[in-house]
Image (cartoon, rainbow, N blue to C red):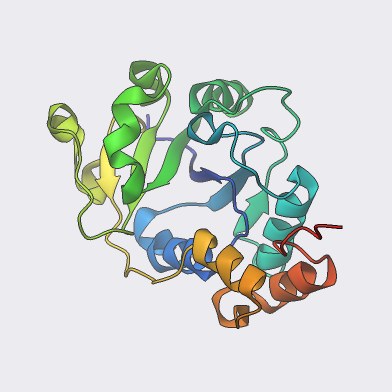
Amino acid sequence: MPPSERVAIYGGTFDPIHRGHIEALDAVFDRMGWSRVVLMPARVQPFKVGVRSSSAFDRYAMAVLATHDDPRFEVSKLELEREAVSYTVDTLEELREACPDHALEWVIGDDNLAMLPKWKSLDRIFELANFVVLAREASAELPSHLSSRVIAAEARGASGAIVFAGNPRIEVSATDIRRRVAAGEHFEDFVDRRVAEYISRNRLYLPEDPS
């Protein structure tokens, strides 16, 4: 029985959310047959424990602002409200319970491919969802033992597959945006206008005052 909907879940710190996130999803939305995209800001990502970021509230607010006018997108507080590290498998278990007849597709950038074998309960993740991989880095490689899971988008089922989205790469990163803001350089072209205003108004990413 085919799923009633295909729902994309895009997790990340989104610190800040930028054009590269949104435009990549927009470019493949129809071809992937998604009914909606759920942005899932992480409270603390497992591989970024100890890395300083802006507050959960700020990251959630910026994601809402960046997608406010597009009904295809929604922003979830699920991981932000969890008092723990944000493990994908835990999030998917909750979403599967809430949406038992939907196909869930976890969106990652290809810069995450090398780390996939280290994800908590990866086999269970494949039972719950597909991975859809967005192009970010030309040199990104999939671990060889996962290559058998790669399948064309139109041939995938409800779970267990890795699908390369084939989106155009957009040369922008959250790291560079934060650097630009801290250095007083122009950054507004890389984020939604409302996100740029939010960053400036709330003085995000500026160096700490030594006094």
**Of the pair 114 and 64, the residue shown nearer to us:** 114
The correct choice, above or below, for 114 with respect to 173 in the image is: above
Residue 142 placed where, x, y %?
20, 40
The residue positioned 83% from the left and 65% from the top of the image is 202
Q: Is residue 114 visible?
A: yes
Q: Is residue 157 visible?
A: no
**Of the pair 88 and 26, the residue shown nearer to us:** 88
The residue positioned 36% from the left and 35% from the top of the image is 130
**On the rendered structure, is 155 left or right of 27?**
left
The correct choice, above or below, for 90 with respect to 21 in the image is: above
The correct choice, above or below, for 201 with respect to 59 in the image is: below
Residue 207 placed where, x, y %?
71, 62
**Of the pair 127 and 62, the residue shown nearer to us:** 62
The residue positioned 29% from the left and 40% from the top of the image is 113
The residue positioned 43% from the left and 45% from the top of the image is 107
The image quadrant that residue 119 belongs to is top left
**On the rendered structure, is 70 left or right of 33?**
right
